[in-house]
Amino acid sequence: MVVVKRLGSAFVTLLAISLVVFVLSRMSGDPRELMLSEYATAEDYELLNERLGLDKPYYAQYGVFLADAVRGDLGESIQARQPVLTLILQRLPGTLELAGSAFVAIILASVLLGVATAVWRDTWVETAGNIVAVVGQSVPAFWLGIVLVYVFALTLGWLPMAGRGGWLYLVLPTLTIAANSLAALTRLLSSAMTEAMDAEYVKFANVKSVPPWRVTMVHCLKNAILTPFTYAGIILGQLLTGSIIVETVFGWPGIGLLALQAVQTRDYPLLQGVVLVFAIIYVGIALLVDVAYAYLDPRIRH
Amino acid sequence: MQTTKTAPESTAPDLPAAPAVSLATRLRRALRGAPLPAVAFLALVLGVALLADLIVPHDPLTGDLRAYSLPPAWKAGGSVSYFLGTDLLGRDILSRIIMGARISLIVAAASIALGGVLGTVLGLLAGHFGGWIDEVIMRLVDTQLSLPSLLVALVALVVFGSSFTVLVILIGVWLWPNYARIVRGETLRIRRYDYISLARIAGCSTWRILFVHELPGIYNTLIVMATLQAGWVILLEGSLSYLGVGVPPPTPSWGSMIAEGRGDLASAWWISMFPGLAMLATVLSLNLLGDWLRRTLDPKQVNQ
Amino acid sequence: MNAHGPSPSPHPSARRSEAPLLEVRDLTVEFKTRHGEVRALDRVSFDLRAGETLGIVGESGSGKSVTARSIMRLLPRNARVTGGEIRYDGRDLLTLSDREFRGIRGKAISMVLQDPLTSLNPVFRIGWQVGEAVTIQQGLRGAARDARSVDLLRGVNIPAPEIRLHNYPHEMSGGMRQRVVSATALAGNPRILICDEPTTALDATIQAQFLNLLRGLQEAYGLAIIFITHDFSVVAEMCDRVAVMYSGQIRERGDVFEIFDHPAHPYTRALLASVPKLGETERLTTIPGQPPSSANKLPGCAFAPRCPIADSVCHASEPPDMALRDDHTSLCWRAQ
Amino acid sequence: MSAMTADVPVLEFRNASKHFALSRDRVVRALDGIDLVLEAGQTIGVVGESGCGKTTLSKLALMLQRPTGGEVLFRDMEVGAFGREDWRRFRTSVQAVFQDPWSSLNPRMRVIDIIAEPLVASSSMPRVEREARAARLMDDVGLPRAFLSRFPHELSGGQRQRVAIARALSIEPRLIVLDEPVSSLDVSIRSQVINLLKDLQEQRGYGYLLIGHDLATVAYISHRIAVMYLGRIVEINTSAELISDPKHPYTQGLLAAHLADHPAQRGRNVPLGGEVPSPLSPPPGCHFHTRCPKAMEICSRVEPMSISSGAGLVACHLYGQAG
């Protein structure tokens, strides 16, 4: 029941996004200006008009746009003269690699930090964890990237400065993209853990003489993980959009960089495609998270 | 129970009014545990931003080409006149940071005012009336939250051209769903209190219930949110400016300053470094202040 | 309603002659608050004998729950035991390490908390939670553990226990949940069960059922029970002896009949007279004023500001514990 | 004050029902066919366990919710026919005091504004007069006038409940709905509030609709008691008769669940077995038959009618034949 309802709303969201994308692209002016050279004739314009379907009313154009998108035809890039989908698929692995490694890093580090700060409340561990979290939340990612490059690549020469390659290339971009979300998730988990550790069921677990590590890592963590879990979708989304900035800083060949190039060259079909692909990934993740949450929390399973 | 309430509940003795407390004591009590360095730094940033025109040592927009790429004063070759050095066009970095502070704060204040008012009103209505009004508003919120916002903003800024107004509207529209969601949740929480039912029983109008009983209950939440979001908006404006679609040049913005220095990191690290530090310190202070406000104004504590 | 507790450990009859099972002496607990150190328990002393039920009565803030929780080491982080002894089986429990204490908790002394909704973990099945106690307390695993869990649930009269094991707490009613909590608390065959207001969240008929069940369990397991409550009628129904608490101190202690028939402390007397009795219509006695705040302690007896018979001595200095008949003591200058 | 004819009840429930639809096929029957008359100057107590519908009953009495069946009448007038003036009259005739004094006072208002709010909302009394009235009300409920400028968090639970009572009195209502007014208070404070409520009624002739779960407290305050089970009134009678001679097996069960007042009485009663079934799927016939020790074959089929018994009414097949 929940799943069906969620699927429906995901579908509506995607429709809404496609509409936003379509409207924005039509508001951007006459796409023919960008596609044709200065020397094009009026006939060329007419021809293109027909080919792009611009002579039809807007709703029909939107219908065509949707139907094409469903078939995987996102149009052709103005700059590269290649199908948009091909360009995106080329760059997708790069972004997924980065987002994936960042996601793993975020989950591991935030669980570690969140649990540690809650367990060692009122000690230096909590203070240190809080400092890491609040600084991580406040640092501008693009600037952090630059500082990391300056320190670890330019000054110390330990890590490569830019580009994609082995795992060494991943370290700095991962750190950069993870910083903000890591901090946010740590804080959430820390307060959820703190709350769980003060709950009555923890006292009752103590009555049963459950060993302390088990109280923390089983009884509390399974409850505490539910709150931040709802944010996992948002964080994955942030990682995707964060990739635009981080890929720019590190010259990382992913969709983010592609998007920025499309912005700079005003390559609308490409931009449209990128936004749509991002949106699909976004909505898909949100859906997965919701379903998983419903599975994890017995109280909302019905 | 004693064990769940750490502080014993305030039991007023049957005495006339509480003893008079001096203003200084009240202030000291109110500020207990406040992050004073953060507050002081924010006051400094605010003062500098207000007086920017009067205190900049150099013209932030036009540079002295003879003095390009000067290192900060304490480095070899630095000049005391250009305390934090100059950029590639010979513009004084300190002066540009000062002007940038003004831009950051104005963008933050304006867009939060826009998004905050919009979100608060819609959230209040959704929470108070429920039903289809709630349904429609919350669908809008969900849809917008599942948009890849940064990308949409990029597209919109390209389409409409970047200007200060477009930037503020865009960020404001970006923010409202957060406010709407939280205000709705808070309104629903407050509506469960008996004093709302009792207000209806007393014959209060809907208007009075909304604005006398429900809205004041969420002021604290709004203050905390606005503080925390101010930091976030500054980061956001920085990102957009860094990507070249934020505040249009030549107006100095911290984000675009960082971007300008990116290519010359090896030779002139200070061009990117100092605006970034300014940004970090400002956002950090806002976050510390917001956390403290959250702890002291926590509505749960107000109500218990 | 009889409890079929599996393998009830037989405790010999002689209820009153034995040495006390649990001796609490001068237990003092302090809370660190924004207003400084607050004394939540002040030299609390009582005994618990095998097989008997001791009621600890008091209003919120009187320290009755703190007493229970300090015996079980469940005090909040800002609380500290600053003095006294808790002797069980000749050992002072306060000197045990946490690891040693885990050998006592659940096995020798167990507890049922106030709210059955929050004392069960919402994200684990009932079977998991009962089974965990069985594994820890008795080392059983697999099928043996499940069988024992079913026995325990059956022992608290839960219908169809095999099916109930697969439920989550939110799928059960409050009364059923409190039975699950009790079954879990009994997994280690404890000799002492502390009940911290276990029926406050329950409806009247469910409360009556639960108290009945508890009596059955007491017979079957030979339990000694400490019953924490604010309700004198629960005391009348359940307890052999009573301790009345007010602002962190035991004001009066004695046999339940003695307390109901000859209450010596003015607080006890007033409290008993202020509760409406079924079918009676005469005007209720009131206790003027408010329960005290432990933050600002005045000299003298803490009840003096509300006491109808307080005199200058009461306001000036703290009363001693006056021994009256037999077991009956009262912390009052003017106890009769 | 407008003159009110003594024989017209303030409020009357006529076969009133309240059903909540959770989804298409899941309906909670919170109230089912309630007949109840609330007279000015009288106290009716309503007892029952959680889920019996007593809170919904209070919401209907306060017109916070409308019945889905039957009618609720205010001085012989149906709510649907209310004009603006009728609403004003209703709001100045019926007030409420709720269980939780933390929740019933707006933490951001001072005591004086809390007490005077009903006057602000439904009368045009000048400010000075309002504040003088608030001060007099403080005397009436036994609070020092100095508390008028305080905020709720500066008061204890008992004091807050007195403020809530003063607020309810501010417009001199005819009927006050008391929804568990003492159950969240400390034991030593309860009797203060109970006595205050009784004194006020004696002096001013307020009518009370008292919702409660503790039979002894409800019986102590009320003239008549209605016993509810799963949305229906199963028995209604004068307090004295209901306590001394309960007719309905559920009333008998509730009395049996009442704990001893003295240790000599302990263990005298066999408690009722089972639990209240879900109001989503109440048992057919008499809702109580699943727990009733005296259930007969007819009970699971036919819903019993209310028939008079002594000074009251009882809905039970045991008394059907006797007529």
Image (cartoon, helix red, strand yellow):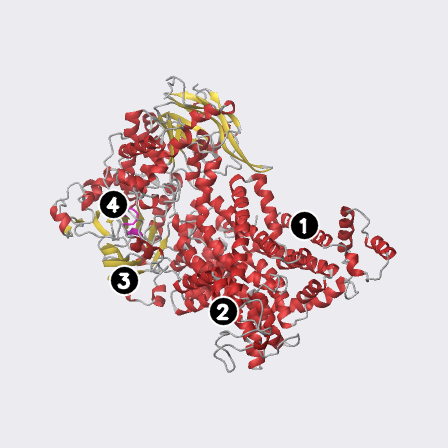
Residue B252 occupies quadrant: bottom right
Numbered mark located on residue C89 in the image:
3
Q: Nearer the viewer, residue C81 or A73?
A: A73
Q: Which residue is mark 2?
A: B57
Left or right: B88, with B31 as reference point: right
Whether B180 is among the magenta residues is no
Quick one: SS at disc 4? loop
In the rendered image, is residue C160 in sight?
no
Residue A56, horizontal then vertical, whole percent: 81, 48
Magenta region, residue range: C57-65
Q: Where the C terminus of chain D falls, by quadrant?
A: top left
Numbered mark located on residue C63 in the image:
none
Residue type for callout 1: Ala
- The chain holding disc 1 is A
- The chain holding disc 2 is B
Query: Image point 18% across, 43% down: which residue?
Result: C307
Alpha carbon of mark 2 to alpha carbon of mark 1: how far? 50 Å
Same subunit: marks 2 and 1 = no
Q: Earlier in the sequence, mark 4 or mark 2?
A: 4
Residue B166 occupies quadrant: bottom right
Numbered mark located on residue A16 in the image:
1
Residue type for callout 2: Pro
* Figure check: C251 above or below B95: above
Residue type for callout 3: Asp
Whether C62 is among the magenta residues is yes
Q: Are marks 2 and 1 in contact (CB under 8 Å)?
A: no
In the rendered image, is residue A93 in sight?
yes
Q: Are marks 1 and 4 in contact (CB under 8 Å)?
A: no
Q: Which residue is mark 4?
A: B13
* Figure check: C272 above or below B236: above
Q: Name the front one of labels 3 and 2.
A: 2
| Majority secondary structure of magenta residues | loop
